[in-house]
Amino acid sequence: MGQLVVTARRVRILISKNVTNPAIRRAVIAHELGHYVLRHPSPTLAEMCSPQPQVPCSDVRDFENEANVFALELLTPTHAVVAVCDLEPMTLMAAGQLAMSCWVPVEAAAIRIAERSARMCAAVYCIDGRIAWVSASGPFLHELAEFVGPALTPGYPLDPRSMASRVMRGELCEPGLVPAGTWLAEARIEEPDLTEHAIPVGDGVLVMLWAGLHEFWLAQRRLAVAR
């Protein structure tokens, strides 16, 4: 969608004519600015013509991810995120508010909210019936560590019970409760439902998961163990 061109005399950002959405154009510009400000090396011609997703590796810097993080920080300042990241109930309405106030794609807003929220929530994007990426809040990963399994990893197929699956089938769904096992590992004991909100975005479905009922349930479990 965009390309950074640096010569001895000037720096330019080229944007595809197909990118007409203003929010996406801003995100593309911010991403390319990230490459420039962070002084990322230029990719080879072969890499530019045939880009391949990078396999996460602690020994190799992920320049594309670094540019994405730069763009998120630039376009969605902390004060704007804090104003909506802890709403209750936590649905994609919060992401929608942030997207409108900061003029960014709603999926970018959902990521930013999930990474800053004190709620047990996670933003998920699905394409072709499978999870493409997941951005979970710290409380979600910490408090639900024993239940977070392969069902919330990229490439995993969607559970047909999920609202995301229903949206992919052409249905429009209001936020509602789904069994925890729809997105988490099946628990050996009875576990509260998750709140799921799913909407079509681009070629896929954007989801916000909120484990609001788990807060009281986990507190009760800890109390029972302490006794």
Image (cartoon, helix red, strand yellow):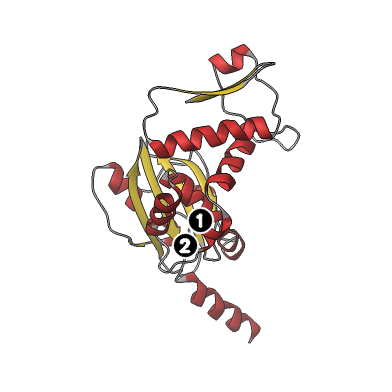
Of all residues shown, which one is farthest toward the bottom? 227
Of all residues shown, which one is farthest toward the right? 59
Q: Give the x, y percent position of residue 104.
A: 45, 44
Query: Which residue is disc 2 drawn over?
Result: 84
Crowding near pointer 1: few (<14 within 10 Å), some, many (20+)? many
Per the rendering, the mark at residue 113 is 1
Q: Give the x, y percent position of residue 29.
A: 52, 33
Residue 191, placed above or below residue 175:
below
Per the rendering, the mark at residue 143 is none
Q: Give the x, y percent position of residue 157.
A: 42, 41
- Label 2 secondary element: loop
Specify the quadrant that holds the C terminus: bottom right
Q: Give the x, y percent position of residue 226.
A: 65, 83
At x 45%, y 67%, the residue is 87
State yes or no: discs 2 and 1 in contact (Cβ < 8 Å): yes
Residue 127 can be seen in this image: no
Residue 196, placed above or below residue 103:
below
Residue 217, placed above or below residue 163:
below
- Label 1 secondary element: helix
Q: How many marks?
A: 2
Residue 189 can be seen in this image: yes
Residue 59, placed above or below residue 102:
above
* Relative side of 150 to 67, left or right: left
Disc nearest the viewer among 2 and 1: 2
Which residue type does callout 2 highlight? Val
Q: What is the spatial separation of the Cα atoms under label 2 and label 1, in whole angstroms?
A: 8 Å
Among numbered discs 2 and 1, the one appearing first in the sequence: 2
Residue 220 position by quadrant: bottom right
